[in-house]
Amino acid sequence: MEKISFNEFKKADLRVGKIKAVKEHPKADKLLILDISLGKGEHDIQLVAGLKNHYKENELIGKKVIIVKNLEPVVLRGIESQGMLLAAEFQDKISLLTVDKNIETGAKVE
């Protein structure tokens, strides 16, 4: 895998986001549409993520996750995703990257 410089890595705006709402994607079997709060002074964003086979909707609501805020938006099966949710994948299992302590929504990850 190609190495990147620390300065390139710093370009990623990683934040703590809180999942406010989840709904099924109307045109995809594996995708969910997530409404993510980034806290005071920030507008909520919408993410599309391939989590349907790994999490139930009620398991996701209220979870604080790590997102890439400044990723260019992309349209996935007709729905705009305005960032990316970070997750680990191993042997067909997905685990969301979360925070282990009570930290403010919108906090910058450094």
Image (cartoon, rainbow, N blue to C red):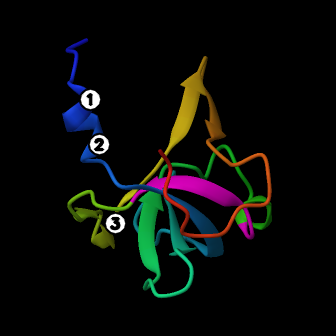
Q: Is residue 108 above or below residue 104?
A: above
Judging depth in this view, the residue of 62 and 6 nearest the camera is: 6
Q: Is residue 42 above or below residue 98?
A: below
Q: Which residue is mark 2?
A: 10
User: Is residue 65 shown left or right of residue 3?
Assistant: right
Measuring from the top left, give residue 102's x and y in whole percent: 79, 60
Mark 1 element type: helix
What residue sits 21% from the left and 35% below the top?
A: 7
Q: Distance of mark 1 from mark 2, alpha carbons?
A: 6 Å
User: Is residue 13 shown left or right of residue 50?
Assistant: left
User: Is residue 60 shown left or right of residue 31?
Assistant: right
Q: Residues within 10 Å of mark 2 (few under 14, many from 20)?
A: few
Quadrant (top left, top right, bottom left, bottom right) of the N terminus: top left
Residue type, mark 2 in image: Lys
Q: Residues within 10 Å of mark 3 (few under 14, many from 20)?
A: some
| Contact between labelled residues 3 and 1, with CB atoms less than 8 Å apart | no
| Contact between labelled residues 2 and 3, with CB atoms less than 8 Å apart | no
Measuring from the top left, give residue 88's x and y in whole percent: 56, 31
What residue sits 74% from the left and 57% below the top?
A: 56
Over which residues does the magenta segment extend?
61-68
Judging depth in this view, the residue of 3 and 89 nearest the camera is: 3
Residue type, mark 3 in image: Ser
| Contact between labelled residues 2 and 1, with CB atoms less than 8 Å apart | yes
Q: Which residue is mark 1?
A: 6
Measuring from the top left, give residue 57's x and y in whole percent: 71, 65
Image quadrant in which you'd find residue 42: bottom left
Which is in the foreground here, disc 3 or disc 2?
2
Q: Which residue is mark 3?
A: 81
Measuring from the top left, give residue 62's x and y in whole percent: 75, 69
What residue sits 67% from the left and 43% below the top?
A: 54
Q: Quick one: label 1 or label 3, which is nearer the N terminus?
A: 1
Main secondary structure along the magenta-highlighted residues: strand
